[in-house]
Image (cartoon, rainbow, N blue to C red):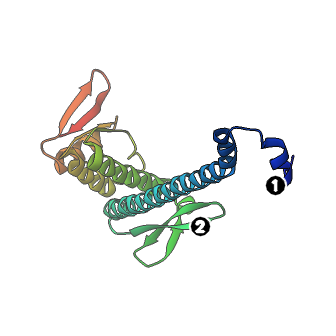
Amino acid sequence: MIKITSLEFHLQFHDLPDNKLAGLMMIPQARAQAQMLGVRRYMRLRAGTIATEQALRLYREQHRSSMMARASEALRTISRGRYTSLTTQPDKDSEVLVAIGSDKGSKLATEMSKGTRFQLYLALRVAGYFEFAKTRGPVPFIADDIMETFDDFRAEEAFRLFTEMAAPGQVIYLTHHQHLCDIARQVCPTVRVHGLSGSGVAERQIT
């Protein structure tokens, strides 16, 4: 870096025209203003980024809270009160689902039986459907024999949820189990059952 003292400046630039000399003297000031503008612009951008991140975090928390409440309600319905709510707990760098039982005991999703995990999976799908339909409009909900491990009572409650979901949209359930068709008819008299040739009932739409 070359440093020019005031004496050197006078010796080297005294012959320059006044307008050029004034321009050279303005360079440090202009540079300082540019730096200040850059700092202000960065601070505005940073503040905007922080505000956006906070808004997204708040939206995720509110959205997750609403979905968890809906999933808890669905699991409580399907399990007929055996599980009353869902929550999460930290697990290293992520979170795991925990179901709270009617006896106030807790159980990790990974500790549940296959049948109960299927109930939890359905409850989460139901909650996700309602959250999606609330903001983007209803779309068809399609499930393929996810009640194979359900007893008749839990299948009945699941079809009640499907009936509720079909009010604003459409539910299509695929199965080859005749008894599930009978349960669907009992729960929702307006159900439409479509059978595939030679294989019994394979699709039902609750509308």
User: Vertical placement of 22 versus 75: above or below?
Assistant: above
- In the rendered image, residue 40, in percent from the top left (x then y), is placed at 55, 56
Residue 69, image x, y percentages: 35, 64
First in sequence: mark 2 or mark 1?
1
Q: Is residue 203 above or below residue 124?
A: above
User: Residue 169 placed where, x, y %?
Assistant: 22, 41
Residue occupied by mark 2: 90
Mark on residue 189?
Answer: none
Q: Nearer the viewer, residue 33 or 15?
A: 15
Going by the picture, which residue comes out furthest to the left?
A: 190
| Residue at (60% x, 55% y) in the render | 36
Q: As shown in the figure, which amino acid type bears the numbered disc 1?
A: Ser
Q: Residue furthest top?
A: 197
How crowded is the residue under tag 2: few (<14 C-alpha within 10 Å), some, or many (20+)? few
Secondary element at image label 1: helix
Q: Which residue is mark 1?
A: 6
Q: Nearer the viewer, mark 2 or mark 1?
A: 1
Image check: 173 left or right of 8?
A: left
Q: Give the CA distance from mark 2 to mark 1.
A: 65 Å
